[in-house]
Image (cartoon, rainbow, N blue to C red):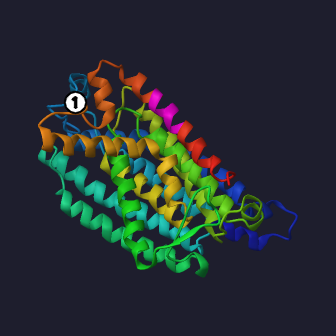
Amino acid sequence: MLYWLTLLSDGGDVFNLFRYITFRAGGAFLTALIFGFIFGPPLILTLRRRQGKGQPIREDGPATHFAKAGTPTMGGLLIVGALMTSTLLWARLDNAYVWLVLFVTLGFALIGFADDYAKVSKGNHKGVPGKVRLGLGFAIALVATVWASWHHPAELQWQLALPVFKNVLVDMGIFFIPFAMIVIVGAANAVNLTDGLDGLAIMPVMIASGALGIIAYTVGRTDFTEYLGLHYVPGTGEILIFVAGLAGGGLGFLWYNAPPAAVFMGDTGSLALGGALGAIAVATKHELVLGIVGGLFVAEALSVIVQVLYFKRTGKRVFLMAPIHHHYEKKGWAEPTIVIRFWIIALILALIGLATLKLR
């Protein structure tokens, strides 16, 4: 919205700053961070009053989690509110990719909110049925995929770009649609599975989104894409502003989510943020790179898949408990140890993903 202040500029005044994506990204970050600090306490107080017993604690989970009983959930409202406000304020509202990412984020946030509300109101872990959640998620992903493909350059439509092998494009044709839908829904649910310890999910989300934000800014500039040999996707640079808002909102949330958490993200936040990662990857034509920068989420999801399949086949478990962060809890690792080590892994994977921009 503030971009339109450039209409008042003669090219040499303060209004000219609003032309620059980097300046507006900084404004979005600060706006979202301040939003979190201002609205965090009243939101947490409201959630605590309305939810009573807070998020239900799994009876088969680690014993240390029972101490968290009474902690309110739906804290994702703070993150989503911060990033939506900052993006609408600082991004160009005539940019299709901005609206695409906002649409996916809000859509998955609503699914998560309904799931959280059902769990809290019923006082158990059975929220919205899984098939309903997946169905709604795939419907949102379908719209987003078609939306993104419609705005991609003709030479990139329905194509799968490969990291490192930059001159190679795989023509998937109509099959690109289900593939991209799986990327978005898979990312949403992988982040959801990761959200099991105080502060565990939000920092890796910020790290992964930061890497994707750099990619979005890079592929949206012809000079960078020519130098690095990447495919040019005009307009994606504005996604950096959304990512900056996510980072600011994420830090604001982490202030209250740091151990011991005053509020949980809930499905409201985890599904929204995971869906956002998937949408950014599809918009920038870096779907496979998402599997690298978001490798921690992939590992968490795979640990659940492996555990379920192996148990059904043999009646035995591969991990003491899945997702894998609970396995390390069962082995006696302290919660902060797991969280910080997983943050480090997420940072390493994000750097590896960014390295693919230069590798040939």
Quadrant of the rendering where the N terminus is positioned: bottom right
Residue nearer the viewer, 93 or 232: 232
Residue 188, x across and y down, in percent: 37, 54
Residue type of the residue flagged with mark 1? Ala
Part of the protein shown in magenta:
341-347
Magenta span includes 146: no
**Can you name the residue that lies furthest to the right here?**
12
Residue 94, x across and y down, in percent: 60, 75
* Residue 27, placed above or below residue 337: below
Q: Residue at x 48, y 41 (%)?
A: 204
Q: Residue at x 19, y 61 (%)?
A: 131
Residue nearer the viewer, 122 or 173: 173
Residue nearer the viewer, 203 or 185: 185
* Residue 111, placed above or below residue 124: below
Quadrant of the rendering where the C terminus is positioned: bottom right
Quick check: 162 left or right of 60? right
> Tag 1, which secondary structure?
loop
Crowding near pointer 1: few (<14 within 10 Å), some, many (20+)? few
